[in-house]
Image: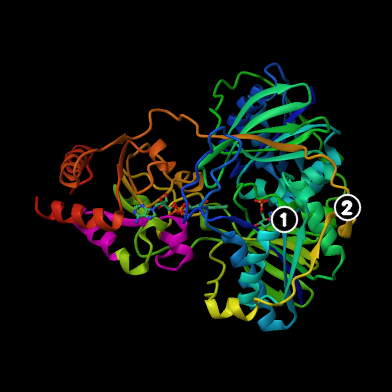
């Protein structure tokens, strides 16, 4: 099976405090630690596991800048066979639909049975996979947490509210967005990264892809930190003082038995 | 202004909470709009939900056919493509169904898509300014959406105040005959219910809940110790379950359990909306986090800026000494 996995390089929210810069035009990018979007890492692991079972190859693709190459390499160190970097100055500030348009053009250059995305990335939109499927006119299932290959069909589970699971048959080719927890992504060590350090990763520009992006319909104007309600009453003082205050509050609220 | 539609989700013959919330979303877009609700499904439930929706929406379009018995987003998308006029603005809850349905719908309608909207600021001609959040709610953004070709707007559940007035007295039109071709290449098979675990966190009064801030499986011990001292039970956020450190039945949130404790200790949890969506009944929330900017501090009653790996053992010791 030929599988394409869409991956994005994002600020690692587990490692960073995301803060708005001085004029609200961006987040503070200095000293940010970047990594592959958490959901995409599960998607790559799933693709590798499928190919280990039924054969085939995994290609990872990203729309980004020069620095995005590092996430492709990381996922190749994990076991993806090929990387593909879509990179052009014209891609700055594009919206989800334009990202999907570029990915569609990349899909047209190969022949894929299955395309995986993450359920969502740093913007919390969860849009690129569903858009790509519609552009390709193939079926889509989001929030997938189990995949079983059954000939030219897949049996997929979608995680829905309450942790319940919705089972579906879906024909290939198709696009699936992957939910975290579907597998346990393998560890990538320095050695693995070194092994793929000199592998050539093809790079395609807007003109290579032959797409006219048009204008973004959805544009971010600024970043800000909202004032929501009162906020928490912060307990201050030494840790003994804080603990004493907290214990008093817990007693009143029924938190201690 | 384009016509505004709202897609009504429902289970067991009762409309979802979003149906009343989207009434107010629509008002923010166009205060005087006569909004049309769309109700799909099969059997008597659909009739009930359509009547319920008519109390809040000027017009309800009802689609009652076997193909819509289960809300398979692929089928519902096809229906909406068949029946929505060009340039429509359609509101859809940003839940696991809306996430499945909407991005592709916007492509097929050639309209704009904006996900997980938490506020509508203004509409100026063909530009709609909305509020979203990024980076798990750590920052907010104003986003402009070009609605000249219509828009698919996914609305965060709970972000808009429900309109309880139910005084519109709208009409229900049975449009089942107009549904058109609904054949798709994805078939719904069955629902598999979440497994029941060893403890039922939904019945507990006091929860010590741990998130990614616990850092390592071995550190769960300090949460267990604290819970034991308090007479509480340990629950968690999603990454802890993804890492297989705790059972799924311990997960609090939209894709986990809905809990209604009296006291909720959020330890190393950032406070994403999917996590907070599983906490009901306005408990006394104490947030312990080493990042003062974590969104959890906006919703907690009491906050403590601390490293949980140091703080929890100290708290346990103090409680044990009482
Ligand atoms: C469809 C869907 C459904 C979802 N359903 C759920 C759900 O049901 N439940 C759920 O929880 N999530 C759910 N999520 C995931 C959700 O979006 C977040 O990713 C998740 O809630 C984050 O968990 P967290 O707060 O533990 O981790 P993070 O967001 O990484 O936060 C960790 C926090 O710990 C703090 N911290 C780190 N180290 C320490 C320390 N030593 N001491 C003190 N503080 C520390 C950090 O400052 C940070 O605030 C869902 C996502 C999707 C897309
Ligand atoms: N710039 C990008 N390059 C490649 N894939 C992307 C990009 N942006 C988003 N995706 C894919 O789409 C998924 C959902 O992202 P989003 O729609 O931005 O929330 C991600 O998990 C990726 O798989």
Q: Which residue reaches farthest left?
A: B322
Q: Which residue reaches farthest top?
A: B32
Tag shown at residue A45:
none
Q: Is residue B267 magenta?
A: no
**In the image, the residue with mark 1 has its CB under 8 Å from the nearest atom of ligand 2:** yes
Q: Quadrant of residue A108?
A: bottom right
Q: Which is nearer the N-term, disc 1 or disc 2? A: 1
Give the residue drawn at x 74%, y 45%: A94
Q: Quadrant of residue B219?
A: bottom left
Per the rendered image, the range of residues in magenta is: B221-249
How would you rate the neighbour count of disc 2 (Cα within 10 Å): few for under 14, some for 14-19, many for 20 or more?
Answer: some
From what the image shows, is residue A14 above or below residue B205?
A: below
Q: Looking at the image, which is closer to me, A89 or B8?
A: A89
- Which quadrant of the rendered structure holds the N terminus of chain B? top right
Helix, strand or loop under label 2: loop
Q: Position of residue B49 (x, y in %)?
A: 64, 36
Residue under pointer 2: A211
Q: Identify the chain of the residue marked 2, using the numbered disc in the image.
A: A
């Amino acid at each position: 099976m030929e599988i394409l996995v869409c991956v994005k390089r994002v600020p690692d929210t587990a490692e960073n405090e995301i803060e708005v810069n001085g004029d609200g035009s961006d987040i503070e990018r200095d000293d940010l630690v970047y990594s592959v979007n958490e959901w995409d890492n599960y998607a790559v692991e799933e693709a590798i596991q499928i190919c280990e079972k039924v054969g085939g190859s995994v290609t990872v693709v990203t729309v980004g800048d020069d620095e995005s190459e590092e996430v492709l390499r990381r996922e190749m160190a994990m076991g993806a066979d090929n990387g593909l970097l879509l990179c052009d100055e014209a891609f700055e500030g594009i919206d989800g639909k334009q990202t999907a348009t570029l990915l569609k053009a990349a899909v047209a250059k190969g022949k894929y049975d299955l395309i995986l995305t993450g359920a969502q990335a740093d913007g919390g939109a969860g849009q690129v996979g569903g858009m790509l499927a519609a552009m390709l006119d193939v079926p889509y299932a989001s929030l997938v947490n189990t995949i079983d290959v059954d000939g030219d069909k897949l049996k997929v589970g979608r995680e829905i509210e309450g942790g319940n699971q919705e089972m579906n048959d879906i024909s290939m080719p198709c696009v699936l967005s992957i939910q975290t927890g579907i597998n346990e992504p393998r560890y990538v060590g320095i050695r693995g990264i070194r092994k793929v350090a000199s592998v050539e990763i093809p790079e395609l520009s807007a003109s290579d892809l032959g797409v006219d992006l048009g204008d973004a319909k959805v544009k971010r104007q600024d970043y800000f930190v909202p004032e929501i309600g009162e906020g928490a009453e912060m307990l201050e003082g030494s840790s003994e003082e804080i603990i004493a205050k907290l214990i008093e509050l817990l007693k009143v609220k029924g938190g201690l038995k | 202004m384009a016509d505004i539609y709202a897609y009504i989700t429902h289970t067991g013959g009762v409309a979802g909470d979003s149906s009343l919330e989207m009434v107010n979303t629509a008002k923010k877009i166009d205060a005087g709009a006569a909004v049309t609700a769309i109700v799909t499904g099969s059997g008597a439930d659909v009739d009930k939900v359509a009547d319920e929706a008519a109390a809040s929406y000027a017009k309800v379009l009802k689609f009652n056919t076997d193909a819509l018995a289960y809300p398979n987003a692929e089928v519902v998308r096809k229906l909406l493509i068949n029946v929505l006029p060009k340039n429509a603005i359609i509101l859809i809850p940003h839940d696991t169904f809306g996430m499945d349905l909407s991005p592709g719908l916007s492509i097929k309608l050639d309209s704009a898509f904006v996900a997980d909207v938490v506020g509508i600021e203004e509409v100026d001609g063909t530009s709609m300014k909305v509020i979203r959040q990024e980076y798990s709610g750590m920052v907010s953004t104003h986003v402009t959406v070009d609605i000249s070709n219509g828009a698919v707007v996914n609305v965060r559940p709970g972000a808009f105040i429900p309109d309880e007035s139910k005084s519109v007295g709208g009409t229900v039109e049975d449009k089942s005959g107009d549904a058109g071709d609904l054949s798709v290449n994805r078939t719904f098979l069955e629902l598999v219910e979440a497994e029941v675990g060893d403890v039922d966190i939904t019945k507990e009064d006091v929860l010590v809940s741990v998130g990614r801030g616990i850092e390592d499986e071995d550190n769960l011990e300090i949460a267990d110790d604290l819970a034991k001292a308090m007479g509480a039970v340990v629950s968690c956020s999603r990454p802890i379950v993804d890492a297989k450190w705790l059972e799924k039945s311990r997960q609090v949130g939209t894709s986990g359990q809905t809990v209604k404790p009296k006291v909720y200790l959020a330890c190393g949890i950032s406070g994403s909306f999917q996590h907070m969506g599983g906490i009901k009944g306005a408990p006394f929330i104490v947030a312990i986090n080493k990042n003062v900017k974590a969104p959890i501090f906006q919703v907690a009653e009491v906050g403590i800026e601390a490293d949980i790996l140091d703080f929890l053992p100290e708290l346990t010791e103090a409680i044990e000494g009482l």
